[in-house]
Image (cartoon, rainbow, N blue to C red):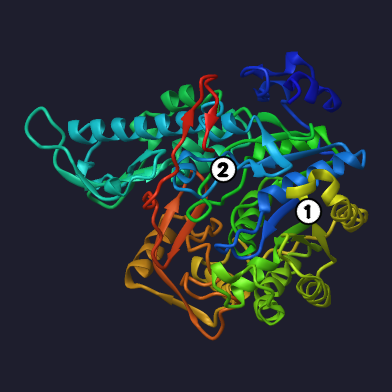
Amino acid sequence: MQPITEIIKPLGLSSDDLIPYGKFKAKIPLSNFSNPTKKGKLIVVTGITPTPAGEGKTTTAIGITQGMGLLGKNVIATLREPSLGPIFGIKGGGSGGGLSKVEPEDEINIHFTGDAHAVGSAHNLLSALTDNIAQRGKLEDFSPSGITWRRVTDVEDRALRDIMTGIGGKNNAPIRQTGFDIVTASEIMAILALSSNLEDLRYRLGKIIVGFDKKGTPINANQIEAVGSMMALLRQAINPNIVQTSEGQPVIVHTGPFGNIAHGCSSVVGDTLALHLSDYVFTEAGFGADLGFEKFMHIKSRFNNLEPSAAVIVASVRAVKSHGGVKTKELEIPNEKATINGMPNLIHLIKVIKSFGLPAIVAINKFPTDTKEELSVLKNLSEDNGAFAAVESDAFQEGGKGTIDLSESIIKATNKEHPKINYLYENNMSIKEKVNNLAKIVYNANGVKWSSQAEKRIKEYEAYGWGGLPICMAKTHLSLSHDRSKKGLPKDYIFEISDVRASIGAGFIYPIAGNIVTMPGLPGNPRKLDTNNNSEIIGL
């Protein structure tokens, strides 16, 4: 690794522009860039619907950044911050792999610059202040039974999903049912990711709904008088973090909203700053194109002058074969037929990207067991069905050198007039109309089935004036549908909405499709970390 002060020099920055966190990572204070101008091209990196085989989206995004660097381009990657929950839950880190990693890998994955802790502290402070206000009766008709704001922790712990708090009595909180979510599912994390500056952060925090009074009127954080204290905890967390790839290109790693519940993208300020400092910015959207990419476009891009020039969709032969019905333990066995059978998922997502008006470049993440025939099927069917290009990528084994052809295809795809973006719904549509459009165009459903609870919520939210907010669908990432068992390209089915909730501070409505858990549990064999005698993390 090079000192971070060396990494920033090609960007025109100096050590005076940084808040250093040791030798290899730093924050860039927003106060240095009060009105950043946009000069670069934004490319969003998404993927096929995730499978147990792994797609290598983050590794590919980092590898492309390295490849562009080898081509002499001024480039920055913008990625989400990893969360401790998935680290110990074996999902893996958020820093890439092989020769395409973000460093210092151990620090990025464990604690980093403390942003997640700041979010958790601000969230739980609001919980405590809300409990206090309600118990003391300081807001008319607002009692503890009306509180909807839960607490958060950064560790997966199924014992905290649904709990009873308080033991009653004069000196204690009353007994009530509540629970914990994981920090990445906190609305404050989503707010931090979407805020454009400190003033916007303050405004959004004030709109957080913490509960309802006895008349059904929403109670927000402004009424709790919690916003100033939360701002004090988050004042540094809003500043983007800068680190480096294993080949020395700058990477902004900032915020990590949950991809199922929230929009699953890195921060607005990170992308905005990167576009001010470089010619090409590669930003990653969480999960597949039916979740992360769609939410990036309708929630992050649409309202923040962050419309991309193209989208890269990462796929692997292994992932395509998984959608073609092959069991995980048999994915290394050559199977050209299964590759053909699994392609409808990728083809559909290429069409989804193109429906927004963007060129789609397929990055074929190579594995040693891929055959020429399987790779040919993936390439030819992608290009025959609308992909601008489908190019093999070997970022894991070769780093930037393994993505040169892919990088050149991206340059070619974006070396033209900026595309006119088409959104899939108008903001003035009703909540039901927006969801129906997404269900038919993105999830390939015939229609939508609403539970009675969801119907009730929609009427309430539209009465409150929240109907014009964008949709942030909460659903499984393992299927285009609401049912994780439906692989490939589900069709001739009805998309089921079980409930509808609102994140007013973040600025979106999130319908819940199927059963979504906001507090994951640890697996049978959680990851075990340790340190050696030099205090270096091992086991990561």
Q: Position of residue 513 (x, y in %)?
A: 44, 67
In-image side of 177 versus 513 (left or right): left
Q: Quadrant of residue 186?
A: top left
Earlier sequence position, callout 1 versus callout 2? 2
Q: Is residue 499 visible?
A: yes
Residue 409 vs residue 307, the one in the foreground: 409
For the point 46% across and 72% down, the residue is: 483
| Amino acid of disc 1 | Asp
Q: Residue furthest bottom?
A: 492
Residue at figure coordinates x 56%, y 23% from the top left: 236
Q: Which mark is residue 394?
A: 1
Does the residue at mark 1 contact the one at mark 2 (Cβ under 8 Å)? Answer: no
- The outermost residue toward the left is 169
Mark 1 secondary-structure assignment = loop
Q: CA distance from mark 1 to mark 2?
A: 19 Å
Classed neighbour count for the residue bearing mark 1: other residues with Cα under 10 Å, few (<14), some (14–19), many (≥20): many
> Would residue 424 be seen by someone viewing this image from the given angle?
no
* Residue 184 percent location from the top left of the image: 47, 43
Amino acid type for the residue under numbered disc 2: Gly
Residue under label 2, please give it: 93
Please name whichever residue, 207 or 190, is drawn nearer the observer in this view of the structure.
190
Q: As drawn, is 314 to the left or to the right of 151?
A: right
Relative vertical location of residue 463 with respect to residue 199 in this rendering, above or below: below
Q: Quadrant of the N terminus?
A: top right
Q: Residues within 10 Å of mark 2 (few under 14, many from 20)?
A: many
The part of the image, by quadrant, that contains residue 289 is bottom right
**Residue occupying the point 53% across, 29% down:** 537
